[in-house]
Image (tube, rainbow, N blue to C red):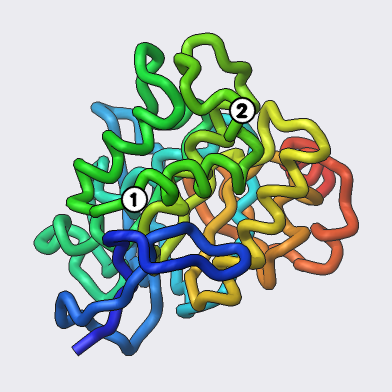
């Protein structure tokens, strides 16, 4: 029986935590095996083969940098892992659950940050967090919402509509959404895009916090140096296929994935 943290009535706070956190035994779940395991995984849209025969294994609690040029299939792969898209061929597991048959269990345990994020322009920052909590069946105190927004530097604009936000501020709202629930797997799609240096440092800090909590993280980016700063391993996705890459070399690189691909050609 697995123990997971869930948000409930405010019970006090600790440094760096969101108000209203409590722990309960809520579900049985696989606790062994990799966080992600794919075999001969493929995805096509019509005749367009976006992912081609991917084999991937990501161990629990590790951080993977997935780099590749625009159009390589990074976003498609992440959407498949969170079950927003279904595989065209092959299969696999996420957090121990089958990608084809156990989508609800996977969505309970996986969070996805996209370039624009799943937020609503006509809602305020806090209202977006409240909507997320309601959709996830979470009980969060008023202090909890404010603490989550304060954690990403948005407490002063908590009541402003998101339509007035810059790209970087929108991404901060999405990061705050991730703070509302515990995750076994965090998928970050171009998390540094549109952020200033402070925002980029915030993403790095979030990744460190995820790792400290035992959360597996996959960072997808076309910038190798950024993606690998907090990662332990690096893979290149190009033309729908995964290729190994020297992690230390990628971490030192300021090149884009397109440049790396040109060098390897």
Do we see residue 244 in this rendering?
no
* Residue 151 image offset from top left, x and y in percent: 60, 48
Q: Secondary structure at mark 2?
A: helix
Task: Give the residue at x 72% y 63%.
Answer: 230
In the rendered structure, the answer to whether residue 18 lies left or right of residue 4 reads: right
Q: Alpha carbon of mark 2 to alpha carbon of mark 1: how far?
A: 18 Å
Crowd class of label 2 (few under 14; some 14 to 19; many from 20; radius 10 Å): few
Towards the viewer: 152 or 114: 152
Q: Earlier in the sequence, mark 2 or mark 1?
A: 1
Residue 137 percent across, percent down from the top left: 18, 51
The residue to which callout 1 is attached is 141
Identify which residue, 168 or 218, lies in the foreground: 168
Compared with 47, 26 (above or below) is: below
Q: Position of residue 48 (x, y in %)?
A: 34, 30
Judged left or right of residue 159, residue 85 is left
Name the quadrant containing residue 46.
top left
Residue depicted at 47% across the width and 22% down the height? 159
User: Which residue is drawn at the image coordinates 28% and 30% (left, top)?
Assistant: 45
Give the crowd class for mark 1: few <14, some 14-19, many >=20 residues within 10 Å: some
- Per the rendering, the mark at residue 156 is 2
In the displayed structure, 208 sits above or below 191; it is below
On residue 215, the disc is: none
Among all residues in the image, which is located at the extreme left? 101
Say if 20 sits above or below 29 in the image.
above
Residue 124 appears in the figure: yes
Quarter of the rendering occupied by the N terminus: bottom left
- Tag 2–tag 1 contact (CB < 8 Å): no
Snapshot quadrant of residue 164: top right
Residue 255: where, in percent of width, then height?
85, 42
């Amino acid at each position: 029986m697995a123990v997971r943290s869930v948000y409930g009535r405010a019970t006090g706070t600790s440094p760096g935590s969101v108000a209203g956190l409590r722990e309960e035994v809520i579900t049985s779940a696989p606790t062994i095996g990799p966080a992600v395991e794919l075999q001969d995984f493929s995805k096509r849209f019509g005749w367009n083969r976006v992912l081609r025969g991917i084999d991937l294994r990501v161990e629990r609690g590790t951080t993977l940098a997935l780099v590749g040029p625009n159009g390589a299939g990074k976003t498609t792969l992440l959407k498949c892992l969170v079950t927003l898209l279904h595989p065209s061929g092959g299969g696999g597991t996420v957090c121990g659950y089958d990608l084809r048959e156990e989508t609800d269990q996977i969505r309970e345990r996986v969070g996805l940050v996209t370039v624009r994020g799943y937020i609503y322009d006509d809602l305020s920052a806090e209202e977006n967090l409240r909507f997320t909590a309601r959709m996830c069946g979470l009980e969060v105190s008023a202090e909890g919402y404010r603490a989550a927004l304060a954690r990403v530097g948005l407490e002063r604009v908590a009541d402003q509509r998101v339509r007035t936000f810059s790209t970087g501020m929108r991404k901060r709202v999405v990061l705050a959404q991730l703070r509302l629930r515990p995750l076994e797997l965090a998928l970050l799609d171009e998390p540094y895009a549109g952020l200033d240096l402070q925002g980029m440092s915030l993403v790095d800090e979030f990744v460190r916090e995820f790792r400290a909590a035992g959360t597996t993280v996959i960072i997808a980016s076309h910038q190798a140096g950024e993606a690998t700063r907090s990662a332990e391993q690096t893979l290149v996705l190009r033309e729908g296929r995964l290729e190994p890459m020297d992690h230390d070399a990628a971490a030192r690189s300021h090149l884009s994935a397109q440049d790396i691909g040109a060098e390897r050609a």
